[in-house]
Image: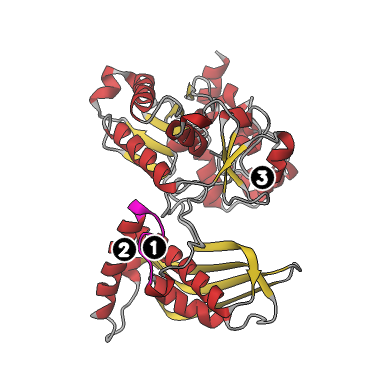
Amino acid sequence: MSETRDSQELGLNTANPTTLVVDLNCAFASIEQQHDPSLRGRPLAIAAYATDAATIVSSSREARDLGIKTGMRVFEAKAICPGILVREPNPPLYRAASDRLIEIMERHTPDVLRMSIDEASMNLSGTPDLVKLGPEGVGLAIKRSIREEIGECVTCSVGVSTSIWMAKQASNLDKRDGLQRIDHTNLVSVFRRLQLTDLSGIADATANRLRRAGIQTPEQFLRATPDRLRLVGMHSEVARGWSMRLRGFEVSGFESTRRKSYSHSHVLARATASQADLEELLMRLSDMVGRRLRAAGRRGSVVSVGVVYRPEAGHFSKQSTLAKPISTGDEIYQAALKLLAARDPRRLVGTLGVGLAGLNDGEDGQLDLFAAAARPRNERLEAAVDKIRDRFGEDAVQRSRLLGRAPVVRDRIAFGNTGHPDESRRPGDE
């Protein structure tokens, strides 16, 4: 009775849920365990690099039960479990599992959105399976197909609700092969069990601002008026969006917030001041940034280079704004190379990064009169190379200058993307 009264007073979305979010549990680690039976049942960490200082990007259920989490350093994990197994990422393996997940979901509805490499949403509105199976039935069917087609080691959490954001909250309620539903009949009671930072999109900084305004819990956040949220510092449109989102309504634009920049950086195993080595590394990094841009259909006009010196902790960074937006690896490299020339050539470089900001959609960029004929051909060529690298890895095709060189920068998947993303999320959400 209380939930019914709350539903009416708060104006919650009372529609029957048709949205599911499917999130693979311990994704990278469980996919590795499925691929290599010798890893099953053992504490396993997938780390960005094979060094003790590297960050863990995924850990197996056995490791998590010991307290080893995403975002830890390898040396911290070894302090907890000296015998933990550590592996570097295998992106093609993870992409294959991600693609299979999408195929499984598309059997139930054509309306599937890949949110990250291990998470996707689906809308069952108007589908026969919504009537035949119901949303929970579809969730169970997806779980069965994952076990049969991806592997018994790979499980998923399924959230059911009236919007993507709320379905994601539901999927987070049980990260051990769970299936949970949030609707107007239980939304308030679910919020009473959560902390502010349990809500997707609420990081520590935002939670602290809310607390300073007297909003201590998700339930208080739900009951806060837009006027009160504006007092926290939220713009009126943002405040209105949160009010709708917390009530179970789909809010356009929030779930598809676009990146403001793309970047890649690399920590060198051995610091160097060699211009030739740094140029080759910069070329690889520029290529990787370029292909992520093209996959998202975007270009950028602000190029940046960052350097961390070793053994001291000093750093150098520089950026420049170009006359017209770019997207190819060679264009990024040529611009970044000019910026790199301003570094101190006497100091050893331990980390090198390159980025591109000032983004717009690819078709928005104006081609100058004389480049108009050449650029489309160059972009088609790089797009073809992208497809080869997507399938066979970052070093399947290389520039002639890099042939025979060690693959310094390996194929990587950042948190919450598919290798060429337009979405991001906080570490630890996996």
Foreground of the two, 141 or 287:
287
Whether the residues at callouts 2 and 1 have beta carbons within 8 Å, the answer is: yes
Helix, strand or loop at mark 1 = helix
Q: For residue 291, which numbered disc appears in the image? A: 1
**Secondary structure mostly seen in the magenta stretch:** loop
Q: In which quarter of the image is residue 367?
A: bottom left
- Classify mark 2: helix, strand or loop: helix
In the depicted structure, whether residue 238 falls above or below residue 299: above
Q: Residue at x 61, y 43 (%)?
A: 202
Task: Please give the range of residues in magenta.
Answer: 390-399
Q: Can you give x and y, in whole percent of width and height, for residue 58 in the image?
A: 56, 40
Residue 347, located in which quarter of the rendered image?
bottom right
Considering only vertical position in the picture, is 69 above or below 346?
Answer: above
Residue 414 x/y as whole percent: 51, 51
Q: Which amino acid does label 3 sit on?
A: Val
Point out the tag, 3 or 2, that comes first from the N-terminus.
3
Foreground disc of the pair 2, 1 = 2
Estimate the spatial distance between the alpha carbons at disc 3 and disc 1, rounded to whole Å.
Answer: 29 Å
Residue 392 painted magenta: yes
Residue 429, given in percent of the width and then of the height, sits at 56, 39
Report which residue position mark 3 lands on.
Answer: 74
